[in-house]
Amino acid sequence: MTALRQRMLVDMKLRNLAPSTQRLYIGYVARFARHFGQCPSELGGEDAREFFQHLIEVKKASWTVYNQTVCALRFLYRVTLDRDEMIRRLPFPRQEKKLPTVLSEEEVTRFFQAVTHPRDRVILLTIYAAGLRVSEALHLKPGDIDSDRMLIHVRQGKGNRDRMVMLSPKLLEELRLYVRWARPHHWLFPGMDPIRPLHTRTLQRRCQLTAEQAGITKRVTPHTFRHSFATHLLDAGTDLRVIQTLLGHRSLTTTAVYTHVSTRRLQATVSPLDRLPDLDPPVPNG
């Protein structure tokens, strides 16, 4: 490990950045260095500009990858290298505004009927029943399931914040069956190595395969079930601020995106045209 990487890791740990964020930042800085074959401390603003152009035009990087790369380099130059003059050359890109993919209740039913692996089924049921992020679900421990109070304790979610979410009675039944089958110890959903949780990529691959088997043409990821959780609650009339709390969003604006995909709300909205009195049809000339 280079001295610069070690310094950056220490800086991130001191600021309590999540381990996943630390790995991402180190990875993006390493790509930046490999692109030029030089240490980042020897590179300047024009180099960064060239690298970002390469990401967009050659790598066809998504907005997420581009944005995370900018964040990683901003941290490196502002905190670890103390070079504030570089920050002005690292502008944030305009965020793409895409609506989340949401499954209908009928599609959710078809999906879970197609799942064959007991562990995968229960993980995805947990995400859908409680609105968890996939990383939050995979890092649950048996003790986080509070059946007495019917709550799930989500520890160190995004932003290193704990929260409590409801425990569905149906999910509790599924979890009890799963625990008797899997007998987990440290992690509720362990991977091949029982001292580590299941890897996210494993679940993502199986998720898409199951969607295809269920005849669902949408691109389905584990996060799709979190989106579906929020949208279905909104369709059922749940207050937006309650959904915000359950999802662990800091800002209500983030949660409000689901108002754009709540089809029942759209269908229930009366067009102003329908409020007008009946209009006489036009009389053809001649």
Image: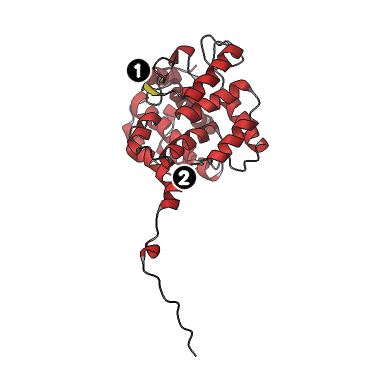
Q: Tell me residue 60's x, y (percent).
A: 55, 43
Is 122 drawn above or below residue 221 in the view shown?
above
**Mark 1 or mark 2, which is nearer the start of the sequence?**
1
Horizontal relation, residue 82 to residue 234: left or right = left
What is the quadrant of residue 179 in the picture? top right
Q: Residue furthest bottom?
A: 286
What is the quadrant of residue 180 in the picture? top right
Residue in front for this viewpoint, 58 or 148: 148
CA separation, marks 2 and 1? 35 Å
What is the quadrant of residue 194 in the picture? top right
Mark 2: which secondary structure? loop
Residue in front for this viewpoint, 87 or 275: 275
Disc 2 versus disc 1: nearer the observer: 2
Mark 1 nearby-residue class (10 Å; few <14, some 14–19, many ≥20): few
Mark 1: which secondary structure? helix
| Residue on which disc 2 sits | 99
Horizontal relation, residue 109 to residue 261: left or right = right
Q: Tell me residue 117's x, y (percent).
A: 64, 23
Residue at 40% from the left image edge and 26% from the top image edge:
158
Is 50 drawn above or below residue 2 in the view shown?
below
Q: Amino acid at mark 2?
A: Leu
Residue at 58% from the left image edge and 30% from the top image edge:
204
